[in-house]
Image (spheres, helix red, strand yellow):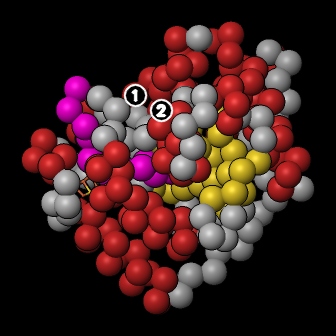
Amino acid sequence: MSIGLKLFQSLGIDTYQLRDKPKVLNQDHENDWASIESKVATCKKCSLHKGRNNTVFGDGNRSADWFFVGEAPGKDEDLQGKPFVGRAGRLLTEVIFSLGLTRDEVFIANILKCRPPDNRDPKPGEVDQCFSYLEKQIDMVQPKIIIAVGKIAAHSLLGSDLPMGKLRGKIHGFGSNEVPTLVIYHPAYLLRSPSQKHKVWEDLQLANDFLE
Ligand code: SF4
């Protein structure tokens, strides 16, 4: 049993095992991924390209049931070119463990693929320019559920400006296909307010029940 699972069980938090799903990939699918990765790697659609060390495309299982969406790369993500690394990333990994999954079994991406300076919030124009990449990723992965991690991701995906307290705790629909979407608190917020962790576990239980 992982350290994460032991920790959650010691806290009295339920954990879950997700059923297996066979991967179905064909050559067209691979070509689509290569095309969008190449476009992101060379993208200059907004001014954020000027300050980046790396684009952060996203990674994980390209036929995952669970698709986690954060807001934008931070300093560590920009340096490593990977989403959700550093302290908040480790906590998100623990959250994924609590579902009986590893990071390799879910897909993780951000609304923005380049780091905003000083970790400021993304500007609406930047989100507008970058959003089509995420839409394409979601379209290709075809997840059973999207997890919007934090307020910025939730607002961008759902086109809402409601506070987190009103967005979490229910299943929304994303896009024309109404992909089931759940909003959870960002791990960076949980690091500052650990007493709120139980709400994330409650929300993930809701997602798990929904999928079953
Ligand atoms: S943030 Fe998105 S739109 Fe802006 S340069 Fe990076 S990849 Fe392109």
Q: Is residue 186 magenta?
A: no
Whether residue 102 can be seen here = no
Q: Quadrant of the N terminus?
A: top right
Give the Cα distance between marks 1 and 2. Answer: 5 Å
> Which residue type does callout 2 highlight?
Gly
Q: Which residues are magenta?
A: 108-118
Looking at the image, which is closer to me, 57 or 61? 57
Disc 1 target residue: 86
The residue sitting at the left extreme is 50
The answer to whether mark 1 and mark 2 are in CB contact below 8 A is: yes
Looking at the image, which is closer to me, 199 or 20? 199
Residue drawn where x is 49% and y is 23% of the image: 188
Looking at the image, which is closer to me, 32 or 101? 32
Whether residue 168 can be seen here = yes
Marker disc for residue 42: none
Residue drawn where x is 68% and y is 16% of the image: 196
Disc 1: residue Cβ within 8 A of ligand 1's nearest atom:
no
Image-based side of 2 in relation to 137, left or right: right
Image-based side of 5 in relation to 111, left or right: right
Residue drawn where x is 88% and y is 47% of the image: 209
For label 1, count other residues whose C-alpha is less than 10 Å away and answer few (under 14), some (14-19) or many (20+): few
Give the quadrant of residue 122: top left
Q: Is residue 175 above or below residue 165?
A: below
Looking at the image, which is closer to me, 178 or 88? 178
x then y, percent, for residue 117: 20, 32
Q: Quadrant of the C terminus?
A: bottom right
Q: Quadrant of ligand 1?
A: bottom left
Give the quadrant of residue 200: top right
Q: Is residue 16 above or below residue 211?
A: above
Disc 2 target residue: 89
The residue sitting at the front extreme is 161
x then y, percent, for residue 87: 45, 23
